[in-house]
Image (tube, grey):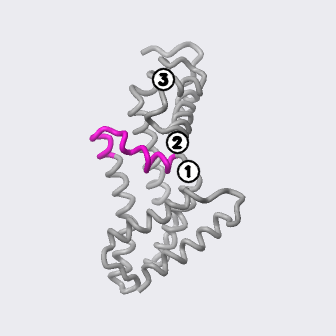
Amino acid sequence: MARKTGSHSEITGPRIRTAALQLFARHGFAAVSMRQIAGEVGVQAGALYLYTPDKETLLFDLLKSHMDDLIGAWEGEAKGDTPLARLEAFVRFHIRFNLERSDAVFLSYMELRNLGPDNFARIEALRKNYEDRLESILRDGVGQGVFSAPDTRIATFAIIAMLTGVNTWYREGGRLSREKVGDVYWDMVRKAVTA
């Protein structure tokens, strides 16, 4: 399909994704129309279909990008050599990364149900990939006698839920800095799993 003269895909595409992310997070996926997204960007509704075939694909792309960015960023993170150092790195990383992307985190948990089975399975596989990285740290720590966790998978889910929960209450400029929040959460996680 030919692009309209004067359009800039490298500008419009990201603007569509940003608008969709904000609108989905604010109003919910089901309540947002393609027309609303187009209006936010300042293009005709039909122009959106040059960038995405449908609203679900747009949601999927947002969720996949978030997971790809999360996993990629964790790969590049300095982790340390011991299970304790790796766990601390994970805790601090997860909080820091997700506090900068609160809308994406909200979508990842609240709007996943709006994906069809194939798209859901793909996002679920990416989430499992990320969760497996934490579980590997916990298993190594249990194996070395540093951590105590009767079920490392349940411990993984509990830790990620606790860390992600920061996004529901943290406010920039509040009583605690991001660094202090990381300190407090690291102390709680360490005490929860230390043998």
On screen, residue 56 above or below 181: above
Q: Is residue 3 magenta?
A: no
Which amino acid is tagged 3?
Leu
Image coordinates of residue 163 in percent, x first then y, are 50, 64
Residue underneath mark 2: 25
Q: Residue 10: image x %, image y %?
A: 55, 29
Q: Residue at x 34, y 69 (%)?
A: 154
Mark 3 = which residue? Answer: 48
Specify which label sits upstream in the sequence, 1 or 2.
Answer: 2
Callout 3 touching callout 1 (CB < 8 Å) = no
**Disc 3 versus disc 1: nearer the observer:** 1
Q: Which residue is mark 1?
A: 102
Closer to the camera in the image, 139 or 19? 19
Q: Is residue 2 above or below residue 152?
A: above
Whether residues under marks 1 and 2 lie with C-beta atoms below 8 angstroms apart, the answer is: yes
Q: Where in the figure is residue 66, as x and y percent of width and height?
A: 47, 47
For this rendering, which residue is in front, 52 or 21? 21
